[in-house]
Image (cartoon, rainbow, N blue to C red):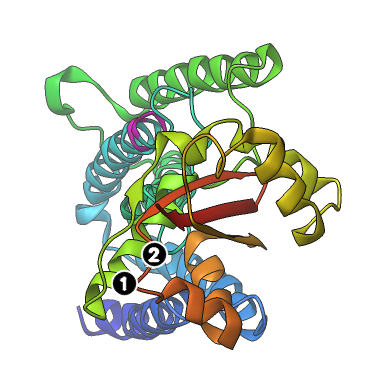
Amino acid sequence: MTKFKSNIFIPLASWIISLVFFFYAFFNLDKDKPIYLIICLITLIIGLVSFSLILIFLDKKHRFFLSKINNLSSYIWFTSTMSFIIVILLSTKGLTEDPCYGPGCSEENYLLPMIGSLFLGFFSFLFTLLTGLLRIIARGEKIKPLFNFGSVKVGFLTFFIAGIFTTYFMGTIRGGSFRIGGGYTAFDVLRLVNEHRKSNGINELKLSEELCDNIVSRWKAIKEGKQHEGFAEWVEKEGIQKIYGYKDLVELYIIADSPKDALDFWLKSPSHKLQIENKKWKDVCAYSNERITVMIMGYN
């Protein structure tokens, strides 16, 4: 018994320490600091090796734990895979909209469940694979699984469902009904702008049907490089002041990765900040696509 404890102590301590460092590095991942990603990979490998040694050093009388762990991890893997698919379908509204998981986006709340289910699924898949191999090598005692559904059946079912989803996902992209890269929507930007105005005691902007009339053409012009210099011509062409009676108008545009980045940029620019916080603006319309946002404010 003493020998058993001494053999298992080092890999057990190593496994616990690697888990602590892994989670620390994982929650501090930063694209500008690759060291955290390296720590994640190293501690993941050390953790898996340590866990393998723990299982190997288990007493023969306790080898049936391999089967229990193997089945449990396969169930977690299946549940995580299903959770990930459900989150993707919910955040894309059945693969009909391009999601934005960045700060200030409508789908921001889906980011943590998506990453969590992905991480848990990957980790439980490795556990299932590892314990399955060890069970074969160590000839672990077979147990009757829950609902008579063992890890092999769970694995085949998981791959089957994931395969169907992947096929549907790829077919939807090629069919054009779902496109990656469109990013956030104008409603995400307007929501943050109004939240900022409200927090500073300024009236919220109301969506204007008149300002929204053919705003897409203005967005296309900005995309083609015709920025503020073409705004007056567009206003005159659309008759926004002449027909709808707007006394004054202003246009803001930005190329940003997320609604929060767009608002942060505007607020850091004195001239843009003055317009965002200007109390005279009552109406608004905006259009966002391909990371480009144009926003027009006015009053009549």
Secondary element under disc 2, as helix, strand or loop, is helix
- Membership of 88 in magenta stretch: yes
- As shown in the figure, which amino acid type bears the numbered disc 2? Val
Query: Is residue 219 shown to the viewer in this render?
Result: no
Asked if labels 1 and 2 touch by Cβ distance under 8 angstroms, the answer is yes
Mark 2–mark 1 Cα distance, whole angstroms, equals 6 Å
Closer-to-camera residue (60/219): 219
**Compared to 73, does 213 lie above or below?**
above
- What secondary structure do most residues of the magenta stretch adopt? helix
User: Is 73 displayed left or right of 265 in the figure?
Assistant: left
Quarter holding residue 11 = bottom left
Look at 29% across and 66% down and name the residue there: 195
Q: Residues within 10 Å of mark 1 (few under 14, many from 20)?
A: some
Q: Name the side, left or right, on which 84 lies relative to 38.
A: left
Instruction: Give the quarter of the figure containing the N terminus.
Output: bottom left
Dot 1: element: helix
Point 23% across, 21% down: residue: 149
Q: Is residue 273 above or below residue 88?
A: below
Q: Position of residue 284 (x, y in %)?
A: 43, 51
In the image, residue 8 lies at what x, y percent?
A: 33, 77
Can you identify the residue that label 1 sits on? Answer: 197
Task: Identify the residue position indicated by label 2 in the image.
Answer: 193
Where does the image place residue 142, in percent across and percent down from the top left? 25, 32
* Residue 92: quadrant of the picture: top left
Amino acid beneath label 1? Arg
What's the magenta region? 86-90
The residue lying toward the viewer, choosing from 133 and 150, is 150
